[in-house]
Amino acid sequence: MKVLKHIYIMLMSSLLLLGCEQNKVGLYEGPDEAYFLETSGSMIVDEGNPTVIIEIGTSTVQGTDRTYTVEVDNERSSAAEGTDFELVSHSVTIPANETVGTFEVRGLYDGVSPDGRTAVFRITASGEGIADYKNNYALGLFKFCSFEREAFVGNYTIYENSSVFGPYNYPVTTMPGEDEFSIYVDGLWTLAGTPVKVVFNSRASTCNIPEQAVFVHETYGQAYIKSIEDGTINSCKGSIEGLEYMVYVEAGYFDITSSYWEKDAMAPATFGKARIDFNALSPIPFGNE
C-alpha cells in the first residue's frame, strides 16, 4: 500500500511540474521603448487653472535615469499651447530601476474654449526608443463656468427640429424670472406675448419647462407646454442644447420639438418664420407618434 502511495505522489508531482513548465511566461527580451500608459483623457478647466498628470511608461527596467521630451502635435491639436494650456515641463524623467514617469499639463481658463478643444502630445527622444504603439496622447480641455442666471438673459435664436413643421429657427427674448434659477422666454414656439417659464438645475447643468398654460384653442380648449427632455446648459456661452418640449391639448399634441438656443449679440429685427395660426391646428392623438 505504501509503494502505491509513493507512486501516486510521484505521478502527481510530475504532472504538476509539467503543467508549470508549459505555463511558464518568458522574460521580455525586446528593445527599451517609451509609450503613453493611456492614449486619451480630459480635464475641466475652471478659474483655478488646474493641472493634470499624464504617465509615460517604458518596456524595460534600466539601471540609469532615462529622459524623454514631450512635444505638442500642432497639426493634430485644436488647442493652442500658451492659450488653452501650458506644459509645466517639456521633459519626462523615468528614474533608474523604474518604468513610469510623468509630466503635467495646466489648463488656462482665460483662453480655453467653452466648446472644448483637444491637445495632442507625442514623445520624442535622442538615442532612445519610442514605441510604435500608444505614442500619442489626446487631452480634451473643457471650460467650466459657474452657473449665473444672467448668462441666460438676452436675445436668442432658437433652432428647432419639429415633428410637425420640420427644421426651422426664429428669434426670442429672455427675461429674469422670480428667482435666481428661472427665466421667462417671449416668443418660444412663436408664442409672442406669452412668456414661458424655464427653470434651471444648476447642479445638474440642465433646465426644463414646467407644465404651464399658453393659449386657448377655439375648438380644443386650453393648450399647454411642458418639457419631455431636459436641456443641457452651458453657462460660459449662455446656450441651451437638447431641450425637448411638447405643445398639447387634452385631445393630443400640436407639436413635439427638440431645440438648441444660441445667444445673440443683438436683437433680430423680425421673426424669420411666420407665426403659427394656432386655431388652424388640429391635435395629433397621443400614441400616434
Image: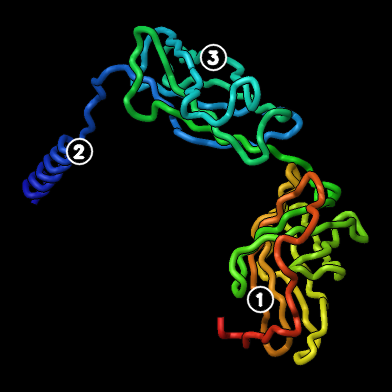
Marked residue nearer the N-terminal end (2 or 1): 2
Foreground residue among 226 and 60: 226
Looking at this view, name the residue that lies furthest to the right. Answer: 178
Q: Secondary structure at mark 3?
A: loop
| Residue shown at 81% from the left, 62% from the top | 199
Query: Which image quadrant for residue 46?
Result: top right
Which disc, if any, is residue 23? 2
| Mark 3 to mark 1 CA distance (whole Å) | 56 Å
Task: Kindly identify which residue carries mark 3.
Answer: 90
Query: Which image quadrant for residue 14?
Result: top left
Q: Nearer the viewer, mark 3 or mark 2?
A: 3
Q: Is residue 8 above or below residue 276?
A: above
Neighbourhood count class around disc 2 (C-alpha, 10 Å): few under 14, some 14–19, many 20 upward: few
* Residue 73, percent from left and from top: 47, 23
Q: Amino acid at mark 3?
A: His
Which disc, if any, is residue 18? none
Marked residue nearer the N-terminal end (3 or 2): 2
Neighbourhood count class around disc 3 (C-alpha, 10 Å): few under 14, some 14–19, many 20 upward: some
Task: Kindly identify which residue carries mark 1.
Answer: 255
Q: Amino acid at mark 2?
A: Asn
* Residue 28, percent from left and from top: 26, 24
| Residue shown at 75% from the left, 52% from the top | 203
